[in-house]
Image (cartoon, rainbow, N blue to C red):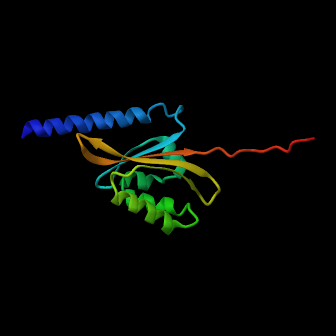
Amino acid sequence: MCYIFCRLSTYKLLYVVMISRLSQGKSQTTAGLLVVDNQRKMVSMNRKFIELWSIPKYLLMSQDDDQALEFVSEQFDEPKSFLKEVRELYLQPDLEIHDTIKLKDGRRFERHSQPQWLEEKNVGRIWIFREMQKVKWSKCLA
């Protein structure tokens, strides 16, 4: 019994170390990273994720993914549609997505989400968001 517990603890620690390494280099990464476990608890995120979504401290402290989703949904033109889409994704834990989302303020994010596996067991989901730069067009003078 102790062997199984110790093994699982070691893997959990390795998982946390792997995610923290992804989150390092805060000044270098342009991606916002969020890791959510199977209980829908936000277990890790980087500073860029917090900045992109303007996540308030009380939500960070709660680690409640549902509350955070409710908060960020208000940044969309159709919050209910956004929530429905994300909740459907959680119901399909093997699904991986890569798409673009548009916020009310005009910003666009590349969104990538994939399940996280540990010894063939789904242990959660990672979300990656990158803000897409606005393309500035200048008039061509003939």
Give how far across and how far down residue 35 sits, in percent.
38, 46
Give how far across and how far down residue 101 sits, in percent.
55, 55
* 74, above or below 97, in the image: below
* 92, above or below 80, in the image: above
Total residue callouts: 0
Using the image as rendered, state which of residue 62 and residue 142 is in the foreground.
142
- The quarter of the picture where the N terminus appears is top left
Residue found farthest to the right: 142
Q: Image check: 102 left or right of 111?
A: right
Give how far across and how far down residue 56 sits, in percent.
48, 54
Using the image as rendered, state which of residue 56 and residue 76 is in the foreground.
76
Q: What residue is drawn where x is 27% and y is 47%? A: 122
Q: What residue is drawn where x is 18% and y is 39%? A: 8
Q: What residue is drawn where x is 33% and y is 51%? A: 94
- The quarter of the picture where the C terminus appears is top right
Q: Image check: 26 left or right of 135?
A: left
Q: Image check: 64 left or right of 119?
A: right
Give how far across and how far down residue 31 sits, in percent.
51, 40
Q: What residue is drawn where x is 85% and y is 45%? A: 139
Q: Image check: 112 left or right of 123?
A: right
* 22, above or below 56, in the image: above
